[in-house]
Image (cartoon, coloured by chain):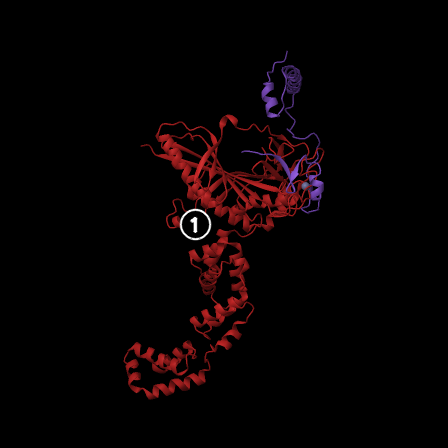
Amino acid sequence: MSAHSIDIHRVAKLARLELSDDEATHYAAQLHRVLDHMDTLAKLDLSGVEPTSHALPVYDVVRPDEARPGFSQQQALSNAPKSVLDQFQIPKVIE
Amino acid sequence: MPKYIVTIGLEVHAQLKTQSKMFCPCPVEYGSEPNTHTCPTCLGLPGALPVLNEGAIEKTVLTGLMLGCTTPPLVKWDRKNYFYPDMPKNYQITQFDLPLCIGGGVPLYDLAYPKDVQKNIPNPGKVVKLTRIHLEEDVAKSTHHDKFTTIDFNRAGTPLMEIVSDPDIDSAEEAFAYLSSLRQILVYGGVSDADMEKGQMRCDVNISLRPEGQTELGSKIELKNLNSIAAVRRAIHFETARQTEALDRGEVLLQSTRRWDDDRGETTLMRSKEDAHDYRYFPDPDLLPLHTADILARVSPSLPELPHQKRARFTNDYGCSAYDADVLASEQSLAAYYEAAVAAQPTVAPKKLANWVLNDLLGALNDASLTITDCPLPATALAQLVAIVESGKISGSQGKEVFAAMLATPGTDPEAIIKEKGFEQVSDTGALEAMVDEILAANPDKVAEVKSGNEKAMNWFTGQLMKASKGKANPKILSDLLRSKLL
Ligand SMILES: [Zn+2]
């Protein structure tokens, strides 16, 4: 049994996923194992280690500000389930 | 009835003037056919990888320098997760805890305030403190139709700089001045055109009211859909009144987001705190952190003279009045025009040139609904005309006529217009002296009057001589001659 408690329905809602009760139980258990692993990592003595956001010591990768043509309009829209007015058409969005 | 303290913070998004998008080389171009500037990266197709645009980073760092921010030695980019059709990869790449700029401030220029409060500015010289500036990507553009919504991805992934102020703004008028001053500075740096009406600059307002004497801030209400600087002012006025009334009624205000309707002049509730987003930020594994020392060193030399520095130079070096210097410095293109005129005629007093630029030129441009950038009259031509007027070759009022003719037919030489209109003054001292001697000899009584101290009789002579020369005598030479012979 994990020391953590996950609100699996909230996590699913944030990810726009609909879970059945069985799925919720199944995935909650998996996520608990992930958090338990974090506990294992937290036990390590990292006092001399600087926090990093990336695994590799690679920095400063940039490109010059130069424009280059990409897709044609037809290519851009070719994967759209629906298009109209040379744009992607989606159900009406109300803010 | 308790009084309330209004606290305002602004979040401003400014489009950067780059050639290419933030994470892909698609062109940044507005007004193109929809979906003609896209690629796998900015369409959010699976597997596409972003690469940082160096130019966008430099422009943001420059903005930080102009606004006195500090740049952390190492910065990074993070994912802000949410679902919305204008952001198909379901996260926006932005900067969370290590943004490009931290702190700094926006000085509120006098002329940046609304015209009706410029004479009565509550906190002159105020600098609004900034929290941070970070660099992120813009979203696609949605258009809402009757039965569906359409999406154009040309704007998706274009560089967007977010400038976040501290809750350091006290009134709608200060918010107005903040946005106008900020726009001036961004334009000066060539960072953004920052026109709110064109969507190049967007602004969300956070406003809260608290009773006087209470230190804790009231509930934060966020205002959205503000499409001009004037609308920001109106929305804050409305919201201040609405919240004041609600608090007076004993209502408890809850943190929420409201939408401004400029036509109806009111805000309506969009969402309450319960539906507030949980963005679950985390470092974007596709983008590597960036050291900033080299970028700062590279960008520093391009730090421009800012409006307030230019204003000080115009008053100190050119003898402009504080107001004239303010107006000249308020727009970079106007300041550049003026400086070009000053440089073209170094012998003419810069203050005289300022008068012509501000009164005659701006007036005429305004009448023709033109701005200084599409002024048909080059600064050098205007300066040449002012030099001619100042030399006394033509009178001031003749100068105005020549000016009008120059504007009407751009490219015409002022000398040619003067000839054509017959404004050429007689500046030949010998010829004028003969005329003066003649009239003095013919009017001994008037000569006596002048000698007895009647200055009016002097004007009589000037009038007679101008008439005799059909208005072409150079009035300055004439007056010098009369004085030397009579006084
Ligand atoms: Zn692209």
The answer to whether one can see residue B270 in this image is: yes
The residue most toward the top is A1
* B191 and A87: which is toward the camera: A87
At a point 37% along the width and 81% down the height, the residue shown is B482
**Picture coordinates of residue B250, whole percent (x, y):** 36, 27
Which residue carries the number 1 mark? B110
Q: Can you tell which quarter of the image residue A26 is in?
A: top right
- Please give left or right for residue B442 compared with residue B325 in the image: left
Would residue A67 appear left or right of B324 to someone viewing this image?
Answer: right
- Determine whether the residue tagged by mark 1 lies in a helix, strand or loop: helix
Q: Chain of mark 1?
A: B
As drawn, the chain in red is: B
At a point 38% along the width and 27% down the height, the residue shown is B251
Three-letter amino acid code at the position of disc 1: Asp
Residue B167, x across and y down, in percent: 46, 36
- Which chain is tinted purple? A
Q: Quadrant of the C terminus of chain B?
A: bottom left
Where, quadrant-wise, is the N terminus of chain B in this rendering? top left
**B257 sits left or right of B288 in the view:** left
Residue B107 visible to an observer of this rendering: no
Where does ligand 1 appear, by image quarter? top right
Front in this rendered view, residue B364 or B447: B364
Residue A43, image x, y percentages: 64, 18
